[in-house]
Amino acid sequence: MESNGTEDQGRIAFVQSCWHRDIVDECRDSFLAEVQARGVAADQVDLFEVTGAFEIPLSASFFACSG
């Protein structure tokens, strides 16, 4: 995902589980720092939390289809 930050890249959904919140929150923060370092604006990233790991792919599929 290389970018100069000028073209429309759409939106990014980060879906995380509540399970092991301390670990997952650190992963989320690292992800956000990395995408911002690559030129993705913070307002292009939507953060979602689901109850467990089972719901992550179902939610990701929903968000991908909904645009």
Image (spheres, rainbow, N blue to C red):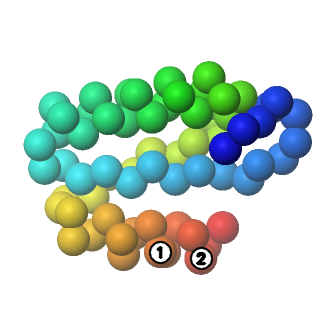
The circle drawn on residue 65 is: 2
* Residue at 36% in and 71% down: 57
Is residue 8 positioned above or below 52 on the image?
above
Look at the image and tell me whether residue 41 can be seen: no
Q: Nearer the viewer, residue 42 or 5?
A: 5
Q: Which amino acid type corresponds to the residue marked 1 in the rendered image? A: Ser
Quadrant placement of the C terminus? bottom right
* Residue at 27% in and 69% down: 55
At which x and y percent is residue 44? 65, 41
| Other residues around mark 1 within 10 Å, as few (<14) / some (14–19) / many (≥20) | few
Q: CA distance from mark 1 to mark 2?
A: 6 Å
Q: Is residue 43 left or right of residue 18?
A: right
At which x and y percent is residue 15? 39, 54
Q: Nearer the viewer, residue 2 or 56?
A: 2
* Residue at 57% in and 70% down: 64
Query: Contact, CB < 8 Å: mark 1 with mark 2?
Result: yes
Is residue 56 positioned above or below 14 on the image?
below
Look at the image and tell me whether residue 35 can be seen: yes
What secondary structure is found at the residue carrying circle 2?
Answer: helix
What secondary structure is found at the residue carrying circle 1?
Answer: helix
At which x and y percent is residue 8? 84, 47
Q: Which amino acid type corresponds to the residue marked 2 in the rendered image? A: Cys
Q: Which residue is mark 1?
A: 61
